[in-house]
Amino acid sequence: MCGIVGYVGKGTATSFLVSGLSKLEYRGYDSAGVAVIEGGDLTVRKFKGRLANLASNIQTSPIKGNIGIGHTRWATHGAPSDMNSHPHLNSEETIAVVHNGIIENYLELREWLKGEGYTFKSETDTEVIPNLIDYYYHGDLFEAVKKAIKRLEGSYAIGVLSKNEPDKLIAVRKDSPLIVGLGEDQFFIASDIPAVLNYTRDVYLLEDGEIAIITNSGVKLFTEDGKSISKEVYHVTWNEDAAEKGGFDDFMLKEVHEQPKAIRDTMTSRVSMDHSICLDDLKLSKEDLENIDRVFIVACGTAYHAGLVGKHVIESLAKIPVEVDIASEFRYRNPLVTDKSLVIVVSQSGETADTLAALRNSKKIGAKIVALTNVVGSTVSREADHVLYTLAGPEISVASTKAYVTQVIGMYMLAMNFAETKGTLTSKELDKLKEELLDLPEKVELVLEDKAKVKEVAKKIYKENDVFYLGRGLDYALALEGALKLKEITYIHADAYAGGELKHGPIALIEEGTKVITPFTQDDLKEKMLSNIIEIKARGAHVIGICYEGTKGVEEVMDEVLYIPKTLGMFGPILGVTVLQLLAYYTAKEKGCDIDKPRNLAKSVTVE
Ligand code: F6R
């Protein structure tokens, strides 16, 4: 979704603004713009399309000021256009605002402001903000911002500049992420840490309702009521290289190759043959677990697919009933959450609007909340009762890969910890699971070594209009994730079905040559799945299977087989998904797609 940056210092503002925005491109956007105070006036440049348009305009005609704000817009209100791009100005063009989020009551505010004599140029919700600030401006920008935000309903991270107070940048956060970077004699705001990492590793992570006033002499922080506050500086320890491509063509391919390390890091100090599974601060006793009426796993997209694996493993190992919900459904369906429920929210970014709302609704009811998230200091991590971090490192590609596998690892660890505490598994059974779990990184490495075969299969499917994925049990969860990966980066229509559902409708779609991808990692469902495969083969399907090395009887019925090392069925999704991610990647490559920035998608969905 939209990205925000801001700069105050002695350097040329646009050099940070453009470089910072380039580090936020992964969030998804369709236009980019900056506003800089130059010679006491506001200079605004904003263009539909890629950031390169803005960058080349600035290169041809540089802007000299030392204080500015910038924005990449992901259109919500009004189509992508120069006019709808940010920054937006008030009617008198004295105040500039960049905004990430949605102002839900903007129509009402817009009408009211029109009645007060204000005029509007864009179709955006954002344009009410500079006008509202102007309405309340009587010589003190901070006071005006405080009053204006009291009128706003919805979510926002905003950056504000005024030519009347040309040395000041004001930033506010509510329900949309915003950080303040603390450099030497220069300060920054940004939607995410990678934007400032070339300049500083020390940041403030703003909380909801906090306001920062940034000038050349430093950063002052306040509550929304204007009370001065102090805050701990968060020092970023991960490396800047983690946010660079490191020799790979695309972030997605790099991130798939980082999966062995991401899995190892996520298990370090938590899974060992020498001790019980440790889940950081999450220590539920046998009594706590027996008192849980139900576990709810709530998430969106790929994280939801990790939740489907979680349901399967928690139910089968720990014998606790689990419901898995898509966060946007959960929040509006009055689920039967009680103060005895355990709600696990899964979110790579920790900022997804629907997931956050599900967390907050459940917390109000008194449920215990566990966050499985990748971003330290994210809103979800701060609001949950307990956090289990996936240690995947920054994930830049819009299509989630290494975050998914670490979320699934998180689910295994939760299920095994619960099973051990409840005594539903013997120590011998647990040791076997741990042994296999610890072997997974090496096995993922073997899958990655075999990518040439996946590339060959990609060449056979990239011209298709439709591809189907079919699986049973955990392979169904895997099929859903494989289909999502393919559709989001190749734009090929892809659907996943449970094997047993075939005869209830989907088999009607099978005709001569239809490509069907079948993960085949669940030994207990092997015979059932083989029958499904034979049925679709009889109707002309071209079947591509993902099978353990040495599986008997598959080459006879499948057109192509991509082999993965043998593991326990429970861990099959980790190896299977690596193949499906590579297949989606190489198919997109064959089609010449912009893999890291697929059309219409945003990395962090901070609005509903
Ligand atoms: C798909 C993908 C999305 C995200 C979803 C949730 O590849 O990345 O489906 O999984 O938007 O995002 P987080 O995990 O940040 O809450």
Image (tube, helix red, strand yellow):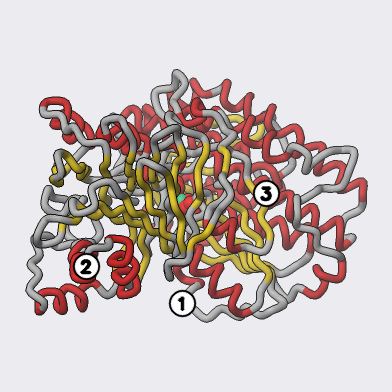
Task: Confirm or deny contact between disc 1 and disc 3 (CB under 8 A).
Answer: no
Which one is earlier in the sequence, the residue at label 1 or at label 3? 1
Point 55% across, 35% down: residue: 578
Point 43% across, 31% down: residue: 199
Q: Nearer the viewer, residue 527 or 226?
A: 226
Q: For residue 564, what is the image quadrant? A: top right
Q: For residue 244, what is the image quadrant? A: top left
Question: x and y percent of residue 83 in the render?
Answer: 11, 52
Q: Which residue is mark 3?
A: 410
Task: Confirm or deny contact between disc 3 and disc 2 (CB under 8 A).
Answer: no
Q: CA distance from mark 1 to mark 2?
A: 42 Å
Position of the C terminus by quadrant = bottom left
Callout 2 amino acid:
His
Outermost residue on the right side: it is 427
Examine the rendering and report whether any part of residue 286 can be seen.
yes
Mark 1 vs mark 2, foreground winner is 2
Dot 1 alpha-carbon crowd within 10 angstroms: few under 14, some 14 to 19, many 20 or more: few
Callout 3 amino acid:
Gly
Q: CA distance from mark 1 to mark 3?
A: 27 Å
Point 56% across, 45% down: residue: 233
Q: Which residue is mark 1?
A: 332
Horizontally, is 111 left or right of 433 in the view?
Answer: left
Dot 2 alpha-carbon crowd within 10 angstroms: few under 14, some 14 to 19, many 20 or more: few
Question: x and y percent of residue 411 in the render?
Answer: 68, 52
Callout 1 amino acid:
Tyr
Tag shown at residue 138: 2
Question: x and y percent of residue 331 in the render?
Answer: 49, 73
Q: Nearer the viewer, residue 466 or 484?
A: 484
